[in-house]
Image (cartoon, rainbow, N blue to C red):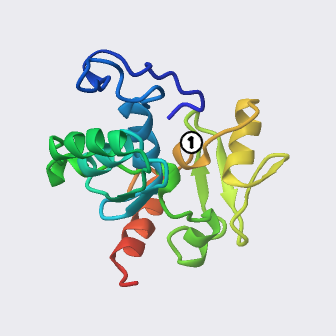
């Protein structure tokens, strides 16, 4: 998700009108705004409190996304519009509510844990995409020529780049095949997900 949000203003079919055909609320928020906020900060079944409920944008989007909500609004005309809006809102089915997690949301696994668990051994060589080798040290760092440090630092030094994702950069060799070290990290993550809390 980008850090700058470009969202449409509330117009057209989304803009709620009162019985006279006028705007039901002067500052009605677009559903896309609340969709992004609720999806990024809550989970299905959570309760959202909106103490300035207005026409119920928060409640409508919360209902769609399978969240519960509490809305507080002192203006009766806004409450009526909000209630009608929420009554006409349908919750998405549970399959549609599932979201994919990003790699950044996954549990962190230090490279040294692969060494501690014996998945890689001190002295074993890792291979870069261009065929350079780096030796695994007992403390979970690498050494390649004059470069030493984390899998990311040594990869960046070899590429003469400011940074490098060492997990996708380095491979280890088994039975004559090069295999990404990221597969070992994923194996640990899978085990972590399967452990009871």
Give the farthest residue toward the top. 12
Q: Nearer the viewer, residue 124 or 167?
A: 167
Residue visible at 30% across and 64% down?
45
Residue visible at 50% across and 35% down?
1
Could you tell me if residue 172 is visible in this image?
no
Please tell me how crowded label 1 is: few (under 14), some (14-19), or many (20+) other residues with Cα within 10 Å. Answer: some
Residue visible at 29% across and 26% down?
16
State the residue position of label 1.
169
Q: Nearer the viewer, residue 179 or 59?
A: 59
Q: Position of residue 100 (x, y in %)?
A: 34, 48
Depicted 197 relative to depicted 33: above or below: below
In terms of secondary structure, where does tag 1 sit?
Answer: helix
Task: Answer with left or right where residue 192 lies relative to residue 162.
Answer: left
Depicted 124 relative to depicted 12: above or below: below
Depicted 7 relative to depicted 33: above or below: above
Task: Answer with left or right where residue 123 lies relative to residue 44.
Answer: right
Q: Position of residue 70 (x, y in %)?
A: 37, 60
Residue visible at 61% across and 56% down?
125
Q: Quadrant of residue 36?
A: top left
Screen quadrant of the C terminus? bottom left
């Amino acid at each position: 998700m980008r850090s700058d949000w470009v969202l449409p203003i509330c117009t057209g079919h989304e803009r709620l009108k009162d019985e006279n055909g006028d705007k039901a609320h002067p500052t009605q928020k677009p559903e896309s705004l609340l969709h992004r906020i609720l999806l990024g900060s809550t989970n299905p079944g959570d309760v959202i409190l909106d103490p300035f409920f207005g026409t119920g944008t928060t409640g409508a989007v919360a209902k769609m996304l399978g969240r519960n909500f509490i809305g507080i609004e002192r203006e009766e005309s806004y409450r009526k519009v909000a209630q009608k809006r929420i009554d006409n809102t349908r919750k998405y089915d549970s399959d549609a509510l599932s979201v994919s997690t990003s790699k950044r949301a996954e549990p962190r696994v230090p490279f040294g844990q692969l060494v501690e668990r014996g998945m890689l051994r001190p002295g074993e060589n890792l291979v870069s995409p261009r065929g350079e080798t780096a030796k695994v040290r007992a403390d979970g760092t690498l050494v390649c020529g004059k470069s030493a440090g984390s899998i990311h630092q040594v990869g960046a030094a070899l590429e003469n780049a400011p940074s490098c994702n060492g997990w996708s950069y380095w491979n280890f060799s088994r039975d004559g095949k090069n295999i990404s070290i990221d597969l070992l990290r994923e194996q640990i993550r899978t085990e972590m997900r399967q452990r009871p809390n």
